[in-house]
Image (tube, rainbow, N blue to C red):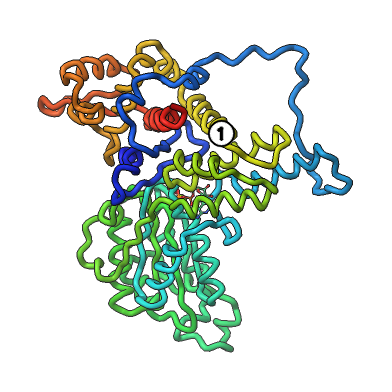
Amino acid sequence: MIWKRWARAESSDTETAVAAPVEATPAPASPAAASVATVDAMSTRPAFLESLWREPAPSARATPLPRFSASASDDVENEDGESNIARRRLALRDALGASQPVIGRDGFAGRHDALSQLIQAIEQQRVHVVIYGERGIGKTSLVHVFAETAREARYLVLYGSCGTEAEFSAMFRSFASRIPRLYHRSVLPNSPEAERGDNLDIMLGETFGPRELADLFAEVTGTRVIIILDEYDRVLDPGFRRDVAELIKNLSDRAARVQLVLTGVAQNLDELIGYAPSIRRNIVGLPMRPLNSGEVRELVGIGENAAELHYSEEAIGMITAMAGGSPYLVRLLAHHAGLTALEGRRSLVDESDGRIAVERVLTDWNASLPRRVQASLGREEAREQWPLLVASARAGSSADGFFGVEDVFTELGGSTPQAGIERDLKRFSNPHDLLELHDLGGELRFRFRYPGVSALLLMSAAMARITA
Ligand SMILES: Nc1ncnc2c1ncn2[C@@H]1O[C@H](COP(=O)(O)OP(=O)(O)OP(=O)(O)O)[C@@H](O)[C@H]1O
Ligand SMILES: [Mg+2]
């Protein structure tokens, strides 16, 4: 959670800004932010926010039930205006839909530096790599494109996604079962073992640990193997992480032709792999940074080509500012903006489409929050304290989301009395309200009960500045 940095991105060139989004989760974990929010800009609540809290209009009886907008058959012959639009909507969804990682080069924008560092670490330095960064910043997409590239160079690439219950021997037995036994030094090409099509797993004992596995992998010859462990941060068992560190150490000591690439949500290397000095020499950490404006443009360009649209400079500027370098948000906003233009039968996507896109995203985020949270956020007291809540969202941008009265005081510009801030924050800290309050030995620490709320506040604040 480094949303504060987003909000300050314009004020400091040295700060990096990253994103933290998830689609299809109950609460959005991704804010947008761009420029510095002044207290002035926050002091009036932007009019568009009202639409967030408006009850949906009762649907008129005469309104026909919704229908699909396109036929499921791929037949687009004799297309009329309607089906042309429908086709372009689908093309836009395929190009910019934000719920899936990119799996091939066609939909992948930018990241030349990250890809080349990754290739260099694997090919030249022969080390293991840990890719880390905020949620939704593009780690999985990068490893998929990397895997495609490595396979072209005849690497054997094995991909696995870690779950909370990941268990070392089960996971690595499954990897071993995808490596042909033919690549074991002891197996000759025309031998019965090779011809049977066995895989390395049958050479593993009933139980094995990282040492036994490294012994086996050290015998791999005739290819190079890359094992990708995606979502490594999700693993709960410290024993699993210890075993992986031990495996990395043993593979490195034996100069094995098997390399690991780990990815996970983290702000630094230690957070992901723990303090492991014994393997520091053998791994390279690759932090994922936010997309720069050229990369945002490239990503929007993929949508433009697919759906025969053109995004105006202003629209791209708005998407860039609101997305704060998150590829997820770029896609989400550019997709919505493009759809709005297509709905209006236009091929030019302009700033007003961008604005509608932001409002839709905010409304969707709000709707994805639990009803109780929506109600807390929409009540008059919260609306009145909107600047305080936005400042709190900024203040809560540390890794664990906690903040104190003083942090909010700073975010508000340092002139609001701290006692008043404390009193107001406490008003939002009742059970089931927006904030949690922890008293750590006399020191008050607050945190948003749902991260999605701070995401919403930050994006709405960024929007307020743009519409101001
Ligand atoms: N270079 C890129 N070009 C185009 N789209 C991208 C790129 N990187 C990421 N995306 C898009 O951003 C979204 C998030 O990407 P991805 O799932 O790869 O992130 P992640 O860091 O693995 O997320 P998580 O932390 O949730 O695992 C996806 O919709 C993906 O399509
Ligand atoms: Mg991922």
**Residue 279 in picture, x, y percent from top left:** 25, 67
**Does any portion of residue 1 appear in the rendered image?**
no
Which residue does the image show at 75% across and 22% down from the upper left?
Answer: 65
Instruction: Look at the picture and state if 141 lies above or below 4.
Output: below
Crowd rating for badge 1 (residues with CA inside 10 Å; few <14, some 14–19, many 20+): many
Instruction: Look at the picture and state if 277 lies above or below 137.
Output: below
**Residue 118 in picture, x, y percent from top left:** 41, 67
Residue situated furthest left in the rendering: 441
**Residue 230 in picture, x, y percent from top left:** 43, 56
SS at circle 1: helix
The residue identified by callout 1 is: 357
| In this picture, residue 82 sits left or right of residue 78 | left
Which residue does the image show at 49% across and 39% down from the upper left?
Answer: 318
**Does any portion of residue 350 appear in the rendered image?**
yes
| In this picture, residue 118 sits left or right of residue 318 | left
Which residue does the image show at 41% across and 46% down from the upper left?
Answer: 135
Residue type highlighted by circle 1: Ala
**Residue 322 in picture, x, y percent from top left:** 45, 38
Quadrant holding the N terminus: top left
Front residue of 393/270: it is 393
| In this picture, residue 122 sits left or right of residue 354 | left
